[in-house]
Image (cartoon, rainbow, N blue to C red):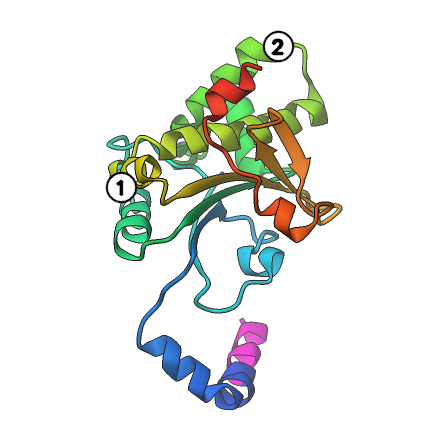
Amino acid sequence: MEQLLTGLHQFHSQVFRREKEFFAKLANGQSPSALFISCSDSRVDPSIITQAGLGELFVMRNAGNIVPCYGASNGGEPATIEFAVAALGVSDIVVCGHSGCGAIQAMLAPEKLETLPLVKGWLQHAEATRRIMLENYPNLKGEAQLETAVCEHVLVQIEHLQTHPAVAVKLQRGELTLHAWVYQMKTGEVWAYSSDDGKFLSLTNLPGEEAGKRKVSNPRQARKK
């Protein structure tokens, strides 16, 4: 806590005072271009990964970067999605998983969650991913299993997003693009799913213009290629 308080004082006395006009402008309203859905893991920071400034991202974080299907949860996720799309008018939604995700590890071994009933209940929203792994990848173990599960899980969340009315409307109008990303903590790379190629490709090794074209149109259909 001492470190946090020190940082707080530094922000107020140095950063805020130096950029007072910028913060005054932000206080009048926000117009982020993207909704960024990521895991609560302390090692994953959307603003640092994307180098986005204040006001550029509308961020939703939870354990396992989970997007419950519409009507399946009374939590804040549906309201956050609706507000970002219908009220703020974001043009992009990024669902970003990450390597070594503890929530996905727990999803793959639910018997280890008996002492964490709320976590176990929350991960019921990831049941589709668990079934995909059991039935489609029965021979994978260890790190290979986790890596594949993280990627499949992100794609399932993209599918869940499309059940939300506000998202469905904007997708039908062509006013919204969905992006499936996976952040690799050991290398700093970001993988993005390409529906054209049917696989995840490294965004960090692509030119900026080409990287911006990586999007998900129909992930379920693309995965069947």
The stretch drawn in magenta includes residue 57: no
Q: Nearer the viewer, residue 134 or 111?
A: 134
Q: Nearer the viewer, residue 139 or 196?
A: 196
Instruction: Find residue 127 and report its image quarter.
Output: top left
Q: What amino acid type should be assigned to the residue bearing mark 1?
A: Ala
Q: Is residue 219 above or below residue 181?
A: above
Position of residue 169 measured from the top left corner of the image (x, y, whole percent): 27, 38
**CA neighbours of label 1 inside 10 A, class few (<14), some (14 to 19), many (20+):** some
Residue 166, numbered label:
1
Horizontal arrangement in the rendering, residue 23 relative to residue 11 (left or right):
left
- The stretch of residues the image draws in magenta is 1-9
Kindly identify the residue that appears in the image at 44 percent across and 32 percent down. 157
The stretch drawn in magenta includes residue 7: yes
Q: Is residue 106 above or below residue 92?
A: above
Please identify, in this view, whether the residue under mark 2 or under mark 1 is nearer the observer. Answer: 1
Q: Nearer the viewer, residue 28 or 186?
A: 28
Residue 138, numbered label:
2
